[in-house]
Amino acid sequence: MSLRLVNRDYAASGGGLVSDTGEEALLDEVLFRLTVRRGSFPFLPELGSRMYLLRREKSSARTDLACQYAAEALSGISGLAVTGATVGWREDDLTAEISLLWQGEKLTVTAQVEE
């Protein structure tokens, strides 16, 4: 179980926080790990991803690097595999759509790539 995140903040309902379970909790954890800058937590230096580096790369290299960075960031989640990535611009923002395989189910998460 995890607390639901909406626009990088905890979701509230009826005076309390909303929690997720199962697939929703997994996707929340995946999105958190992909959007947090790797090394930004001093006591957890391996937490997060290097997705922010995609902006510096040539467009031809971004897809392979997105797969690599996602796999690195998500390696601590057992039973989860990165199967692909698509990187592109959406409304002036660079986004990475990461394809995953979890318990035989195909999942997709889209993360905004920050500077």
Image (cartoon, helix red, strand yellow):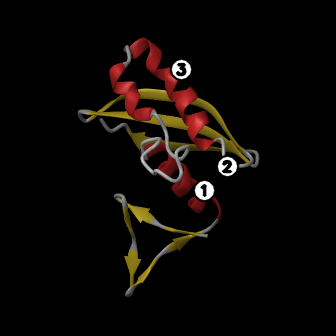
Q: Give the image location of residue 46, x and y in percent.
A: 56, 43
Identify the residue position indicated by label 1 in the image. Answer: 26
Name the N-terminal-most of marks 2 and 3: 3
Q: Give the image location of residue 25, x and y in percent.
A: 58, 62
Identify the residue position indicated by label 2 in the image. Answer: 77
Q: Secondary structure at mark 1?
A: helix
Q: Alpha carbon of mark 2 to alpha carbon of mark 1: how far?
A: 9 Å
Q: Residue at x 46, y 15 (%)?
A: 61
The amino acid sitting under disc 2 is Ile
- Which one is nearer the viewer's eye here, 65 or 109? 65
The amino acid sitting under disc 3 is Asp
Which residue in the rendered view is the most extreme toward the front? Answer: 43
Q: Which mark is on residue 95?
A: none
- Which one is nearer the viewer's eye here, 106 or 22? 22
Left/right placement of residue 56 relative to residue 31 reads: left
Which residue in the rendered view is the most extreme toward the left? Answer: 92
| Pair 2/3: label in front | 2
Query: Quadrant of residue 83 in the image?
Result: top right
The amino acid sitting under disc 1 is Leu
Identify the residue position indicated by label 3 in the image. Answer: 64
Q: Residue at x 37, y 13 (%)?
A: 58
Query: Quadrant of residue 10 in the image?
Result: bottom left
- Classify 20 as above or below 62: below
